[in-house]
Amino acid sequence: MRNRLIKLSCVVLLAVGAIILLSPVNEQWLDWYLIFNSKLLNAVLDLARVGLIALLIAGLLSPFEALGWWAGWYGDGIETSITCKFPKQLPAIETDDSLAQPNQYPSQYPSRYIVYLDGISQSCADYPQRVQNFLDTLSASLPPDMVFIQDIMAYSALNRPLTIQRPFSKFWRWVNRIEDWNPKSPLDIFVNLRNTFQVAVSTDNRYGPVFNRGTAQVILNSLRQQGYRAGVPITLLGYSGGAQVALGAVTYLKYALNDVPIEVISLAGVVSGNNGVGEIDRLYHLRGNLDLLAKIGAIMFPKRWPLLAWSDWNLACTEGRVQIISLGPVTHNGPTGPIDPVTQLPNGRSHLSQTLEILMSILMGDVKGKGEGER
Amino acid sequence: MLNFGMSVLWNSSWQLAQAASGGAFDNLWMLIRGALALHSETFQSLQNQPHSLLAALTIVFIAGFAQSLSQIVVLFVNQVRPSRFALSLLISALFFVVGFCFWAMSIWGILNISFGGYLPFNAVVRTLGFSYAPLMLGVLVVIPYFGSPIFVILSIWTLLAVVVGIESITALSRWEAFGSAALGWVMLQLIQKTIGQPIASLGQWITNWAAGEELITNRNRLLEELYAGLKSQRGLPPDLAKKVEGKSSLPLNPPK
């Protein structure tokens, strides 16, 4: 009852806030600070207003990459030149008849394809050190018959990094240089905001189908480049917003690959529960108890509210297709996040080793059981 | 050449501004702010201002343009070219103005039946036109995920402005004003479903002409379009494979 009251209050506050912000009343309240006659305060608040307007413009422009791709406005389709890492132990595979006869391939062929979709801090194919360390460790832990694809630009229907072939690519390269020089720089907020809008595009009922179709095509291209053969199970491993992108692509991948088994692992994922969940064979939702963003995701998306028992998310939970796995006292990212190799849990294990152990259990099929009640 | 073009554009804009100067256009922003703030005095004052009818229709056109942005997905999924995309938005905004005029006409009819005296048609158009001011912010509907709640808020805001506007130019109470707006909307729906069908067909024909193709507007069919090209051409029926071949933006990337 209390939770519902809080949610209702939030909705009312949001509505009132939007009306106040958009109405002429804002002229009165936005200029209140003039009475302080402080140039510094004026400058700071004017900057904040400019920032808000810039944010609005960024939001307005965010759907156009995916929409323009589908309409063919950019001419050259999806970027396929970014090579994916191919495990040395597997031979190059001829795939001319890749869709011909499922399950008719020799035993050295892959038993599973794992596709990694990074979090919202992704701006190019070079991952931050912590993420790269996680990917390398996971890659080394995988059995030789599993193919790990990890170079997909999750927030671009064109599979195009922010740093090349874009109007603002110079800006993104500058942000990356500053980040390389000073990892604690706050400039990564720009990348996070840009990619958060792409997650919003993925969840949107209008643009989502087009964006998700684009990312599904990107994943398909990578799978085909890696010699994917029909019938081989796929695991989409999405970190943070990457989990939403993964879920969005599931419906199209299922169609394209003749209903192949697809599992999604959401690592600290922020997922809307309004697309892909209905088609999913199993979703493993790994989240820390201190992960605020994952909690906000559960509040922000109405389809995940327990109140809407008929939503895809809640039906999947009821049917046991969604399994929520707690990571303990772990936050969303950074030194206290799920992939940090240094920070330790109360039991002495590092966050990374716990996460890897859970991931390996899932991939090796050792995690069984029904979805938990918590949503 | 560029300078010449710019000077022609500038002169034309200046002449248009001169033509529209004075009256409502001089105080346009103030009037819009009054309408947004639901001030009944604003709706009363604009009745006597020169050019207020043109100003009202301008507001409706801008609102229509902003509204048409919320439907851009249809144009994109249909793979409309950029120039035709812009033309389609303009045509859509013009249709919005036409639809508005029909709605104003039906409300005008109802008001003159229920309201004791005679209310001029242009007074209704002026009032309703300025009531559409909140919809000028309809461009915000493009924002992903938050667009739909923003649309609901703007629609309610516009309805409130319509009610306040009707209340301020008639002797009707607030609820009566609301009732006349609602009845006008019902009457518009009836007209659209009956005698308005030929006009709707003509509108669809013009929309398709602007887009350069027969637009698919049904949501389920639009979603089906997105599945084209996902499987390799070899696995597709010949007719669909042919269709996929025609879509230059769908790289099939045969496996190497």
Image (tube, grey):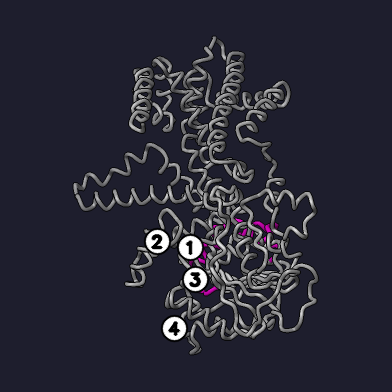
> Which residue carries the number 2 mark?
A172
Q: Nearer the viewer, mark 4 or mark 3?
A: 4
Chain identity of mark 1: A
Which of the two labelled residues, at mark 4 and mark 3, occupies the earlier sequence position? 3
Q: Nearer the viewer, mark 1 or mark 3?
A: 1
Q: Which residues are magenta?
A: A287-316
Which of the two labelled residues, at mark 4 and mark 2, occupies the earlier sequence position? 2
Three-letter code for the amino acid on which mark 1 is drawn = Pro
**Residue at screen point 55% across, 81% down:** A355
B255 is higher (above) or lower (below) than B39: below
**Residue at screen point 62% across, 65% down:** A219
Expressed as whole percent of the image width and height from the top left, the position of residue B14 reads 34, 23
User: What is the crowding at mark 4: few (fewer than 14 residues within 10 Å), some, or many (at least 20)?
Assistant: some
| C-alpha distance separating marks 1 and 4 | 31 Å
Label 3: element kind: loop
> Which residue carries the number 1 mark?
A161
| C-alpha distance separating marks 4 and 2 | 30 Å
| Residue B195 in the figure: left or right of residue A130 | right
User: What is the crowding at mark 1: few (fewer than 14 residues within 10 Å), some, or many (at least 20)?
Assistant: many
Three-letter code for the amino acid on which mark 3 is drawn = Asp
Which of the two labelled residues, at mark 2 and mark 3, occupies the earlier sequence position? 2
| C-alpha distance separating marks 1 and 2 | 9 Å
Q: Is residue A305 magenta?
A: yes
